[in-house]
Image: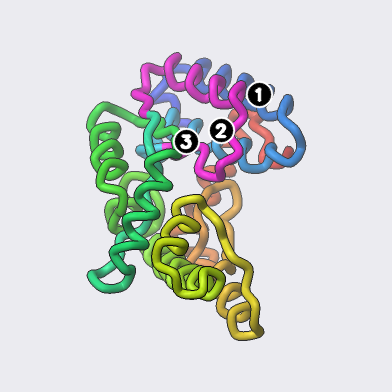
Amino acid sequence: MLETVWRSADRDGSRLLRSAAALAAAVARLPVSLRATAAQDGLDLLAVLAGLKPLCLAGRGGAFDAEFRAALVAAAAAASLPVLEAAPWEPQAAPGVLPDWYRAATAQRCAKMRVLYLCRDVGIRDAAAALSAQGRVAAADEAALLGYPLCCVVQHHRQALGLEQLTIAMTARVAQGDPDRMARLIEAGVEPLPASAEEWRDYRRLTAIAPAPATSVNMCAACAGDDASPAAALARSHAALAAATAYPLRN
């Protein structure tokens, strides 16, 4: 089935194989500390090239080597994929969940950041641009664009919003409740450490993840415990893509 997918997108698959080789070489030139994240970004782009997902979101981790970024852009350009460099988005929150000052500060912080949206087509690029400009994205929209199981994205958003609420509480403690200082700390990306057993317990719970192998998906509890789950199926398809293109899963 995989061969049918990528041959339909690339005739004999030669372009996909060349892209895989170029991206693998670019990953190998990186410092060891950057390789794991970069390797996954590269595989996510190969999945877009192969027709397995609509969008590769690269550089979210912050440490984005310029040469590797260029390798991603070159691989996308060779396949005529639209590329968007724009601010990252955050999970959408229901009214009242996050205070207005915090939303404004995080919007200011994200506006200064840039990630790559490597897109299957112009329609996907336009949708990504709209959500980037909006700043906050619903779980269903993110799942559809990234090709992730909705159940996993819903749990990820729940944890991410919980972590934001914990961060607000810890920032208030550090800033001694001073609203202006709190906003400055959030905009600067300062992340206070937990200071009590309760905070550490909440922090560990909210940052716990179960990565689906060969993907950027953090599996929900249901998918993590089921080999027939959507996340497990996605992991198998991406692992098969890596095997078919001789792309190294571990670097």
Name which residue lies at 42% across and 16% down: 77
Which residue sits furthest right?
Answer: 32
Quarter of the image that includes the N terminus: top left
Quarter residue 131 falls in: top left
Residue that numbered label 1 is attached to: 26
Asked if residue 3 shows in the view, the reply is yes
- Closer to the chain start, of discs 3 and 1, is 1
> Residue at image x 45%, y 64%?
182
Of marks 1 and 2, which one's residue comes earlier in the chain?
1
Q: CA distance from mark 3 to mark 1?
A: 17 Å
The picture quadrant where one finds residue 240 is top right
Q: Position of residue 237 (x, y in %)?
A: 51, 45
Mark 2 neighbour density, 10 Å: few (under 14) some (14–19) many (20 or more):
many
- Up/down of 135 relative to 32, above or below: below
10 and 212: which one is in front?
212
Q: Are marks 2 and 3 in contact (CB under 8 Å)?
A: no
**Circle 2 sits in a helix, a strand or a loop, which is it?**
helix
Q: Is residue 43 above or below residue 90?
A: above
To which residue does mark 2 refer?
42
Residue 80 percent across, percent down from the top left: 37, 17
Q: Do the residues under discs 1 and 2 have CB atoms within 8 angstroms?
A: yes
Query: Left of 61 or right of it: where is 56?
Result: left
Residue at point 60% right, 28% down? 245
At x 37%, y 22%, the residue is 81
- Tag 3 or tag 2, which sits nearer the N-term? 2
Amino acid type at image mark 2: Gly
Q: Which residues are magenta?
A: 56-84
